[in-house]
Amino acid sequence: MMFTDQTVSVVIGGTSGIGRAVVSALSARPGTVHALGRSTGLDVSNPAAVARAFAALGPVDHVVITAGSQAPGGSLTALDLVAAKAAFEVKFWGSVTAVQAAAPHLRPGGTLTLTSGFLARRATPGTFVKTAMNAALEATVKVLARELAPLRVNVVSPGLTDTEAYAALPAEARQAMLDRARATLPVGRAGHPDDLAKAYLFAIDSGFVTGAVLDVDGGALIA
């Protein structure tokens, strides 16, 4: 689909991190970009609120969902299941809620692009919640691509990306995490939000891609 002054894009989670980079990239093109998220008052775990948001926007062309959640880590035997379910409510069910609300408003040729994470397909002890949540999203996207065709539905799977999502970490721990990425990833560094934004643009631009998982992980799955 060509971008024109009438093209409308929506980025849920677009006020920070990867989502903000996607908003910036789309803003360089013709059309209107709406950045929605917690800071704009949108709670993706509230289906009625998400439905109202899309009803107010009217027809749209592209929807990108980067909204995430803080998933608890640790072994299953010690896992806080309440926190785990809350994380699923935001990232998994929030993404599904957004797709359900957005789909009726998408114009022909429209796209939906979700976000998972490389742990969906990398068995790492202590990451049960992230693995299950992201794997569920990747499986769901393939079904949605069939159900919603000819709308195209894809999912971007980021690796470690240096964003404010890690702002709560002590500075030393954050630096150690980035140093490990430099030492272990084939590309020799952690990702930047702009690296990921290019993948979302590819999913939007390539009319022959649907039901795909786009790995942008610096080689984490082969490291």
Image (cartoon, grey):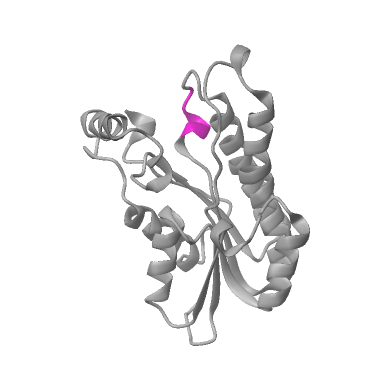
120 within the magenta span: yes
Identify the residue at the far right of this view.
48
Q: Is residue 126 above or below residue 136?
A: above
Farthest top residue? 77
What range of the chain is rendered magenta?
Answer: 119-123
Return the x and y of residue 86 as percentages of the image width and height: 67, 37
Q: Furthest residue to the bottom?
A: 5
- Main secondary-structure element of the magenta-colored stretch: helix
Residue drawn 64% across the image and 30% down it = 84
Q: Position of residue 146 (x, y in %)?
A: 69, 54
Side of 155 relative to 188 (left or right) = right
Left or right of 113? Residue 171 is: left
Nearest the camera: 135 or 165? Answer: 165
Quadrant in the rendering for residue 176:
top left
Q: Which residue sits at x=40%, y=78%?
A: 29
Q: Position of residue 42 (x, y in %)?
A: 64, 60
The residue lying at 31 percent from left, 45 percent from top is 191
Please give left or right for residue 120 compared with residue 54 in the image: left
Pinpoint residue 27: horizontal percent, then vertical percent.
41, 75
Quadrant containing the C terminus in the rendered view = top left
